[in-house]
Amino acid sequence: LLLVLVIFFFNLHLLMMDSDEMIPTKTTPTLIFLCVMAVMGGFPIGYFTTIISGAMLIIQSQFLLDDQWLQIIVSTTVAAAAIFALLGGWFNQRIGRKKVILVSCLFYIIGCIVISVATNKEAIVAGRFLHGIAIGLSSCTIPPYLAECVPTNIRGRLLIMFPVLIALGQWAACIFAASLSYLRDKNCSWRIMFGIGGIPVLIKLFGFPFMPESPRWLVSKGYIDEAFKVLKSIYGKTDKGIAMAQMNINSMTEVDHAEESHTRKRECMLFKLLRNRASRKALIVGCALQIFQQLSAVNVVMQEKYYYNNDDFSFVIVNFFN
């Protein structure tokens, strides 16, 4: 975690020292705090999707779960995440990115409490469902929130940090699951596993109210002055920072007017993108990358090892390569 933070701040400092005259040379506290709080949202996604693998070994024996209940407890989070990831776009547009992220934090915390005090398998399913809601909302909200807030010269690297924190959360879940499994009180060990995951979320819950709303969302709702204030706090109040903020406001306003025009004409944006050669190539490449990633069967490995911890699956893989 320390290494990731060092790399994060080092890259942020280097990128903000860019010699381009239209890029602010000052790293503002708002930008640093915003990036840290937002990127932290990847950690619980990785943690809560992985910790069930270690906890289920204890939960299964304690509650005498059969295969059906095992599948329900594990898959509930994935199902809820898929549903609310689809609904997340609508919530983002209606109430704003910041509020959706705060709501996801509340679902994380409530889910941790429900699971930690659970006395039956139904309560565990309920807690896992709440975690799925939080994962779905945060996974479809944090990346666009970052992209809409941070300067373009550091946008790519910061967006990469989000999946890095997801992987870090998976690694931390494996470490805590392995360590806590040696506790004598097995009834407490799996509860602590889920409780620990709520600590970074709690920090984020208290820190994120001080974060600005997405300027892109503010512009879409007509709050131009508020969006300009947000961008000035991010880019800095220097002459170059103010110029950069104004340039972004003008760009966002033009895009918003174009979207309204297409909506009135009932013109599908997808068809317009496909008619443009450059946009068509970028769209095809982007979609192809996502398709081939899913066809690589990585989700099969994730499902069997990180979620179910299936020893039979390990036996099949080892014998296949032997």
Image (cartoon, grey):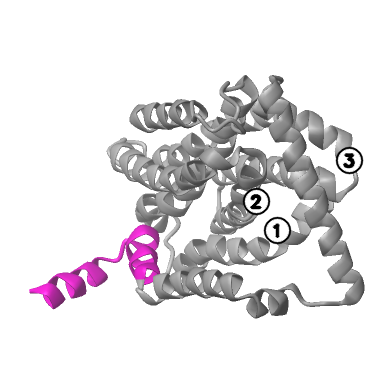
Residue 295 versus residue 71 in the image, above or below:
below
Residue displayed at 35% across by 74% down: 296
Q: CA distance from mark 3 to mark 1?
A: 22 Å
The image quadrant where one finds the C terminus is: bottom left
Q: Nearer the viewer, residue 315 or 70?
A: 315
Disc nearer the start of the sequence (1/2): 1
Q: Main secondary structure of the magenta part?
A: helix
**Quadrant of res 232:** top right
Q: Secondary structure at mark 3?
A: loop
Q: Amino acid at mark 1?
A: Gly
The answer to whether residue 99 is seen in the rendering is: no
Residue 272 seen by the camera: yes
Label 2 crowd bin: few (<14), some (14–19), many (20+), radius 10 Å = many
Residue 279 part of the magenta segment:
no
Q: On the image, which quarter does residue 193 sit in? A: top left
According to the picture, the residue beneath numbered tag 1 turns out to be 88
Count of number-bearing discs:
3
Helix, strand or loop status at disc 2: loop
| Residue located beneath label 3 in the image | 223
Q: Residue at x 27, y 38 (%)?
A: 182
Q: CA distance from mark 3 to mark 2?
A: 20 Å
Disc 1 versus disc 2: distance between alpha carbons?
Answer: 7 Å
Q: Are marks 1 and 2 in contact (CB under 8 Å)?
A: yes
